[in-house]
Amino acid sequence: MPAQHKALVTAAPFTQPELKDVPTPEPSSGQVLVKVVVAGIMPADWKIPTWGIWDDSYPMVLGFDGAGFVEDVGPDVTGFTKGDRVIFQGWRDEPGHAVRGTFQQYLAVPTYIVSKLPDRIPFEEGVTIFSPMSTVANSLYSHKPGTESLKLSPPWEDGRGKYAGKSAFVNGGATQVGQFALQWAKLSGFNPIISTASLHNTELLKSQGATHVIDRKLPHDAIVEQVKAIAGGLVDLSYDTVVEDETITLSAAAVRPGGQLVVILPGKEQLLQKLSEPKDVQWIIARGLQSTEQNKGALSGLLQTLPDLINEGVIKPTPHEVLPGGLRAVPAGLERLRNNQVSGLRLVVRPQETL
């Protein structure tokens, strides 16, 4: 095990990350040390430093999805051994607030945000799963007290197909979270499952669970009319993955009185309250970071059964693009995301290739 390894460190808000040598940690109680073979890039990785989020957490290593091998196990760890193939989430230490992300070559990770990866799934595919998959699962199915969740019946327990006859609308189905919202909606039995997207992503979204895809470029009134025509009225569940004022307004307009609305990022609570109150719509904010006290352990049952769901093909990776150059490729990938130059796929890097 190397005493030091390469990491992409963001020193302060509004600054660019820099490649540095950092100490390789030993896993503490309840943790595994993972060799990060592939790391996934997502919009939060540029939004956090650019928007000044978590200003008490610098310097930080970002990156919220990883895949690799277990290199060592800490005390009191059961269920994992050296050599296991795993997927995992970057995490924020509470109460210390240190952000320990996957844009590095080695990472100590609490086992409650780690799941085994079936041998047949390459790391480049597996890395696309954890964060967007768990964000949706937590918001729909968690029954842990204190979590923001609709508390639907989990399909990995007794809820598979339970919501047959209910309709769903996913606004932004080609996003990473959107693709897993489609997968979970299908597994729960929702039908129809209607999504907005650029029409060149139609076949992708239908493979993930959408029954109908509407051109996201249409006027919002026209989209709502198409939703009503397909579903026979407004939908029971609306899931917004874009989180702009216009998309939230559309998502709220598509849901029936007394229905349910999920938005994946905080910051729009006043707008949500204004739009939802007249129709008595239940709305929540999806909280995707599983290391918070609020979410910790909420998906333990899912993570144990996740390899089986992946092998069954009901939870599946999203398309990806490998950026050459290891961690040095991350800033260019973040810029592409920031400029809306990525559609329907996940940008990933191989940290061990970093020179």
Image (spheres, helix red, strand yellow):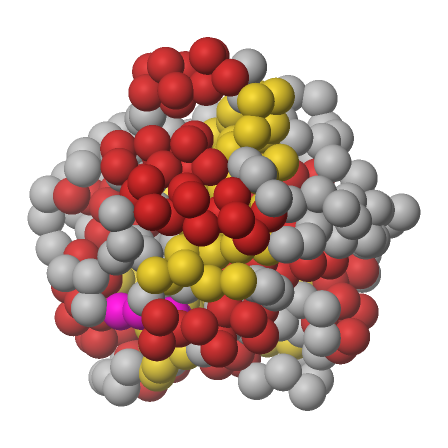
At horizontal 48% and vertical 75% (from top left) the residue drawn is 204
In this picture, residue 27 sits left or right of residue 153:
left
Please tell me how many numbered marks the rendered image carries.
0
At horizontal 35% and vertical 81% (from top left) the residue drawn is 321
Q: Quadrant of the C terminus?
A: bottom left
Q: In the rendered structure, does residue 187 fall within the stretch colored magenta?
A: no
Camera-nearest residue between 289 and 164: 164
Q: Position of residue 268 (x, y in %)?
A: 32, 25
In the displayed structure, 106 sits above or below 329; it is above
At horizontal 48% and vertical 77% (from top left) the residue drawn is 203
Q: Position of residue 163 (x, y in %)?
A: 77, 44
In the displayed structure, 197 sits above or below 203; it is above
Camera-nearest residue between 99 and 190: 190
In this picture, residue 135 sits left or right of residue 57:
right
Please say whether residue 107 is visible from this viewpoint: no
Outermost residue to the left: 15
In this picture, residue 225 sits left or right of residue 127:
left
Q: Position of residue 193 (x, y in %)?
A: 59, 55
Camera-nearest residue between 56 and 137: 137
Predominant secondary structure in magenta?
loop
In this picture, residue 81 sits left or right of residue 175:
right
At horizontal 55% and vertical 71% (from top left) the residue drawn is 206
Q: Position of residue 192 (x, y in %)?
A: 63, 54
Q: Which of the 4 image quarters holds residue 85?
A: bottom right
Bounds of the magenta segment? 342-346
Please say whether residue 224 is visible from this viewpoint: yes
In the displayed structure, 272 sits above or below 174; it is above
